[in-house]
Image: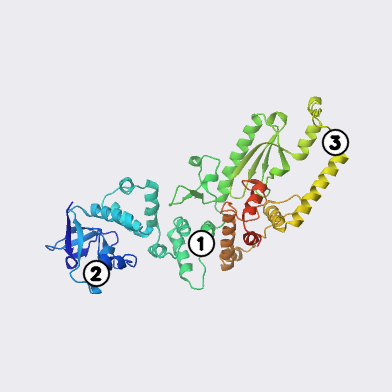
Amino acid sequence: MHIDQIPLDRLSVSKANMRAGKKPPDISDILPSIIKRGVISPLFVRPNCNAGHFEIVAGKRRYFASLEAAKQGQDGVTLPCITLGEGDDAEALEISMIENMLRQNPDQVTQWESYTRLVKEGRSVEDIAATFALTELQVKRILALGNLLPRIREAFRAEEIDAATVKHLTLATKAQQKAWLALFEDADGYAPRGQQLKAWLFGGASIATSAALFDLAAFDGQIVKDLFGDEGYFADADQFWAAQGAEIERRKAAYLEDGWSAVEIVPASVYFQTWEHEKTPKRKGGRVYIDVNGKGEVAFHEGYLTRKEARRQGEGGSEAAKQPAAVRPEITAAMTSYIDLHRHAAVRSALAANSGVALRVMVAHAICGSPLWGVRVQDQRSRNEAITESIETSVAEARFDERRRAVLAVLDFDPDEASVALGHEPRNGVSGLFQRLLELPDAVVMEVLG
């Protein structure tokens, strides 16, 4: 490898350069050091059609910084350059991309432009992934930006649109993209983003293909693919529920055939409360609860009875089971009541003396539900579809959605939950949520309560 010092006036930027374009690059971070010490790391160049002149394949920012240094009075500026052979444009572009990615990560739209040029030069997705040490899925995600309108891509490049919104826009038809873009560019309008955008595109709550119990290959309905990943969504919720319901009934029949005493389907409007049930094996009459939620997800709770049923079963058990352990003397019902009430009084007294802990207990029960009281979410829907859509796309609803997602993130909940008030125990139970609230400062807990 040979490095030559080439004068500035004999250099120009190659069209194969990844950062080629009319807009000058940002050089604010490297200009001071280049003015003081010059360019240390060599540029990659190749001969162009003019004898003695070269075009820059990689190093555009260093070149522009050197031009600025020359304007500030430095004379006879030369740049260290490695001269490449006269290869094809695809090879030159690959060198430019590798060199640029090592120095400053290009934005995703710039990557899309470069990958698209490589594809036009004959490179496959597999070739691009191998060259840049990426997975094929990562390359496909970048290439998926080609399904967006140019104006949307430019807004994404300028960071006017976040990645989540762009991901959902890849699901949209060109007509939907144009309609959304009109709202986005209207100073008095509001363009839905994030989860609201997904609901706007699908006309309501979207159901992911990951929720399906049935075989997707045998599904006759339409599935809209997320071009940024492997996830897809059902275009028609009614078709999904028909197929999902049939599969739930099939699995219910399989449980009964397997010897379970009963199988109950818990509808989406009701939450399965684990604290209201007691774990009971199949041989003792435990039943299966099939818990269905509004997002189409199904959980199978095997071996449960209600606490009342379990207690009644225990009272009617065998004589051996009724025999008390030798080291545990029986106590009367009155004594049990005495102990329970005094224990409750002690806990209540301790909570009254520690308002912070009491607040967290209250918030945990407000979110998960309590046998003594509950919180219901106000329905923001109207019989008039136009009014419902107006509310869903309003500025106030968008701001509230941002706060909801922030609270869900703080609590380590699924960000796609429709409400902070779950009405059921989360993944780690009400005790897990209470422990999480104990870790948070009072100000954050008040934000959750708000």
How far apart are labels 3 and 2 at the CA level? 92 Å
Q: Residue 205: x percent and y percent?
A: 57, 54
**Residue 444 position in % (x across, y down):** 62, 60
Looking at the rendered structure, the secondary structure element under dot 2 is helix
Identify the residue shown where x is 88% and y is 41%. Answer: 334
Tag 2 residue: 67
Viewer-proximal residue, 199 or 12?
A: 12
Q: Earlier in the sequence, mark 3 or mark 2?
A: 2
What distance separates the C-alpha of mark 3 from that of mark 1? 61 Å
User: Is 285 situated left or right of 13 in this image?
Assistant: right
**Is residue 134 in sight in this rendering?**
yes
Q: CB under 8 Å between callouts 3 and 1? A: no
Q: Secondary structure at mark 3?
A: loop
Name the residue at 24% across, 74% down: 71
Query: What colouring does the structure picture have?
Result: rainbow
Q: Is residue 232 above or below residue 107?
A: above
Amino acid identity at mark 3: Ile
Name the quarter where the C terminus is drawn. Answer: bottom right
Give the residue drawn at x 17%, y 63%. Answer: 6
Q: Residues under labels 1 and 2: Cα distance?
A: 42 Å
**Amino acid at pointer 1:** Arg
Residue underneath mark 1: 193
Mark nearer the N terminus (1 vs 2):
2
The crowding category of the residue bearing disc 3, from other C-alpha atoms within 10 Å (few below 14, some 14 to 19, many at least 20), is: few
Please state the horizontal and vertical placement of residue 338, each as a whole percent of the image: 85, 44
Front residue of 309 and 178? 309
* Pair 1/2: label in front: 2
Q: In which quarter of the view is residue 253 placed?
A: top right
Residue 64 seen from this side: no
Q: Give the residue at mark 3.
A: 331
